Amino acid sequence: MSEPVLSIRNLSIDYVGQAGDFRAVRNVSFDIGPGEFFGLAGESGCGKSTIAFAISRLHRPPALIRTGSRILVGGRDVLSLDPAALRALRWREVAMVFQSAMNSLNPVLTIETQFYDVLSTHAGLSRAASRERAAEMLELVGIPADRLSAYPHQLSGGMRQRVVIAICLSLSPKLIIMDEPTTALDVVVQREILERIHRLRQKLGFSVLFITHDLALMVQVSDRIGIMLEGELVEVNEARAIYTDPRHAYTKKLWASIPRLSGGRTLGDAAR
Ligand code: ADP
Ligand code: MG
């Protein structure tokens, strides 16, 4: 098997407090392969975002990664990178889209300038080269290139979120982490964005770590899914098996708490 894009081993993360340490992530291990769409599910507070931030070392005190934890991206040990290597890792190897990412666009800058900020800083592109790359990326996410001169408020929420995804993909990262990327959007737009990412992933070959509490949605887009419960990864399996043959009692309970998938929609198009 080819080398995983992401390899996490025995990851434990504490929030350090005066009243004692709270273990938010407990001994978690999993891999994501090249081009794989990996979903991480579990109810609010189970530690999903804490893992997401740790992968590109964006976690902040009081979060503390415990010794013995290992995070490898493309075979490189993220936890021992110096600041320059860490800067090179972010965006170029691992890019992250947050739930409120669409609100992280700068309201006073055009979309074109926001691409330029990233592409000049992290890839040294000229203004002209950046504009060309930005136009190409916008088209990929289904936004006409003439929107480059728009300001964020002139775009819908779904479009703004697609702009952020396009910026994240513009440096061709090997892994894109999406932490509840569509939760703030309506269901139709959510589905449209995820289907687009699914297709882009096939075309561009990046891997995805997709985080949500919406297991029904996740099963339809992921190759494999990990289920988290109170900081622990309790089950990892093919997306289809998570649905048809849940092993862990908690996974069964998660399904029982979700209304039946509405009629007509099958899993066939996603759980390949
Ligand atoms: P999820 O993304 O699955 O909802 P989080 O990773 O955000 O979960 O949080 C995991 C646990 O860590 C929760 O119990 C949360 O309260 C706790 N936590 C998150 N951030 C902090 C923080 N800055 N300080 C203390 N505890 C935190
Ligand atoms: Mg979260």
Image (cartoon, grey):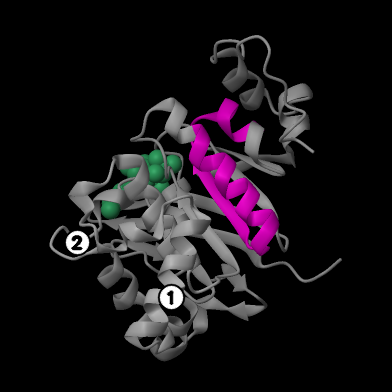
Q: Quadrant of residue 21?
A: bottom left
Q: Is residue 217 magenta?
A: yes
Quadrant location, the C terminus: top right
Q: Is residue 113 left or right of residue 42?
A: left
Residue 57 vs 141, above or below: the answer is: below
Q: Amino acid at mark 2?
A: Asn
Q: Is residue 97 left or right of residue 173?
A: left
Could you tell me what secondary structure mostly forms the magenta stretch? helix
Which numbered tag is attached to residue 132?
A: 1
Can you tell which of label 2 and label 1 is closer to the viewer?
Answer: 1
Q: Residue at x 43, y 42 (%)?
A: 180
| Residue 165: % across, % down | 44, 56
| Residue 133: % across, % down | 46, 74
- Magenta residues, start to end: 191-219
Q: Secondary structure at mark 1?
A: helix
Residue 68 vs 202, above or below: the answer is: below
Residue that carries the numbered disc 2 in the rendered image: 106
Task: Give the residue at the far front of this rendering.
Answer: 146
CA–CA distance between discs 2 and 1? Answer: 21 Å
Q: Is mark 2 within 8 Å of ligand 2?
A: no
| Residue 32: % across, % down | 68, 58
Residue 251 vs residue 40, the one in the foreground: 40
Q: Residue at x 59, y 35 (%)?
A: 218
For the question of whether residue 21 can be seen, the reply is: yes
Label 2 vs 1, first from the N-terminus: 2
Q: Is residue 84 magenta?
A: no
Q: Secondary structure at mark 2?
A: loop
Q: Quadrant of residue 215?
A: top right
Q: Residue at x 48, y 64 (%)?
A: 137
Q: Amino acid at mark 1?
A: Glu
